[in-house]
Amino acid sequence: MAAGAILERDVLVPELALRTRVLEAGDGPVVLLLHGNPDNADEWRPLMLRLAARFRCLAPDFPGYGRAQLPASFGYTLNELVRFVDGVSRAMRVADPITLVVHDNGVGFDVQAASGLGLISMRERTCLLRGEFAIYSAPGMGTTVRARVPLTMPETPLAEDACTRRVG
């Protein structure tokens, strides 16, 4: 695919009986770009154009946003969101590894002062999956979370305290 082209794909997510639009650009390792509320995949177009020379960028519309259907049964639970992302990944034939980038249009926060269990949990879970985790935020500017995890787990388990040492 040409680095300057962004294709729009109509994708069926059979697990949830819905169709969504997925923007696709570039070739290489996969970067999955997830938009915040109340946005849609179009927010990622400028970044996709910059990354397309080195990465395969995918940006789906979440159910009910952009050009995605919103089935009455979809309740925006964490489980349904995971099923949605998994379904889009399968439909787009995503292979290991994957870089996940999530953006929120919220108010943002001072990352250095943050101490909530949610951030600690995200870091620990990413570590347990042998991934990389980064969060970028500033008051008044919103938040971007970047997590890169392998899609298949290695056979050798991590040491019990490997992740707690890395968080903090």
Image: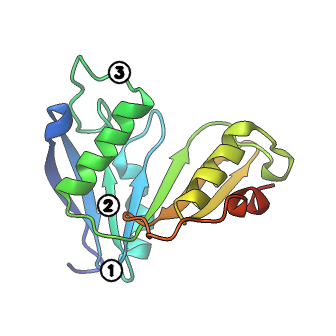
Q: Mark 3, mark 2: which one is toward the viewer?
A: 3
Viewer can see residue 61 = no
Image location (x, y in percent) of residue 50: 43, 74
Q: Specify which label sits upstream in the sequence, 3 or 2.
A: 2
Alpha carbons under labels 1 and 2: distance apart: 11 Å
Q: Residue at x 68, y 58 (%)?
A: 160
- Amino acid type of the residue tagged 2 in the rendering: Leu
Q: Quadrant of residue 38?
A: top left
Q: Quadrant of residue 84?
A: top left
* Disc assigned to residue 83: none
Image location (x, y in percent) of residue 34: 42, 49
131 relative to 83 in the view: left or right: right
Determine whether label 1 and label 3 are within 8 Å by CB.
Answer: no
Q: Specify which label sits upstream in the sequence, 1 or 2.
A: 1
- Pointer 2 local density, CA inside 10 Å: few below 14, some 14–19, many at least 20: many
Residue with the most extreme right position? 113
Alpha carbons under labels 1 and 3: distance apart: 34 Å
Identify the coloring.
Answer: rainbow
Q: Residue at x 48, y 63 (%)?
A: 149
Say which of 46 and 125 sits in front.
125
Q: Height in image: 68 above or below 91?
A: above
Determine whether label 1 and label 2 are within 8 Å by CB.
Answer: no
Q: Which residue corresponds to mark 3?
A: 75
Q: Which residue corresponds to mark 2?
A: 58
- For the N terminus, the image quarter is bottom left
Q: Height in image: 84 above or below 127?
A: above
Alpha carbons under labels 3 and 2: distance apart: 23 Å
- Amino acid type of the residue tagged 3 in the rendering: Gly
- For the C terminus, the image quarter is bottom right
* Disc assigned to residue 28: 1
- Amino acid type of the residue tagged 1 in the rendering: Gly
